[in-house]
Amino acid sequence: MDKKPNGAAVAAYISAMLGLLVMGTVHTMTGASASFSTWVLSIGKLWIPNAQGIGPYSGKETFLLVAWILSWAVLHMLLRKRDVKLAVPVVVFVVGMALATLFVYTPFIDFILGK
């Protein structure tokens, strides 16, 4: 039985982590700056109906989606035919997910913003 390359799968889970990491970063930055928060909301209002009702979350989701789809496209093209040793991508994924989780955890955000 022929073994298929795992690069496409690695691209998929790393890109999902990158999308969440971008959203966490944008979430933290909106807590730090009211003007940035307003700008993020304006991005969400470009395509999400009634985005005003959910505030900057609409823009955060927009950044998540754009980061995810762009990184998936790039990583898929780079890795689709490669067989990747999983040790490094798994560590990158776990560390990235831990950071993404911290960046949406209110006590951590308050700590790094000095609140």
Image: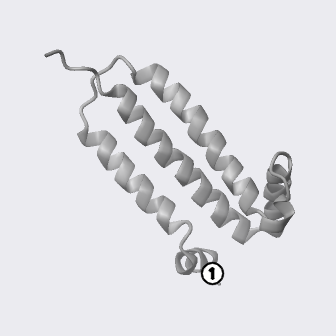
Residue at 43% x, 53% y: name it. Answer: 96
Q: Residue at x 28, y 22 (%)?
A: 5
Q: Position of residue 27 (x, y in %)?
A: 65, 63
Q: Is residue 84 above or below residue 41?
A: above
Task: From the top left corner, tell me how far across and down residue 89 is, in percent.
Answer: 33, 40
> Disc 1 residue type?
Gly
Give the farthest residue toward the left: 1
> Which residue occupies the foreground of this view, 107 or 7?
7
Image coordinates of residue 87 in percent, x first then y, are 24, 41
Mark 1 Cα shell of 10 Å, populated few (<14), some (14-19), many (≥20): few
Residue at x-position 70% and y-position 71%: 31
Q: How many marks?
A: 1
Q: Position of residue 74 (x, y in %)?
A: 53, 26
Residue 58 falls left or right of residue 39:
left
* Residue 11 vertical placement versus 51 (above, below): above
The residue to which callout 1 is attached is: 114
* 44 horizontally vs 103: left or right: right
Q: Name the residue at 67% across, 53% down.
A: 61
Q: Secondary structure at mark 1?
A: loop
Please name the colour scheme applied to the rendered image: one colour
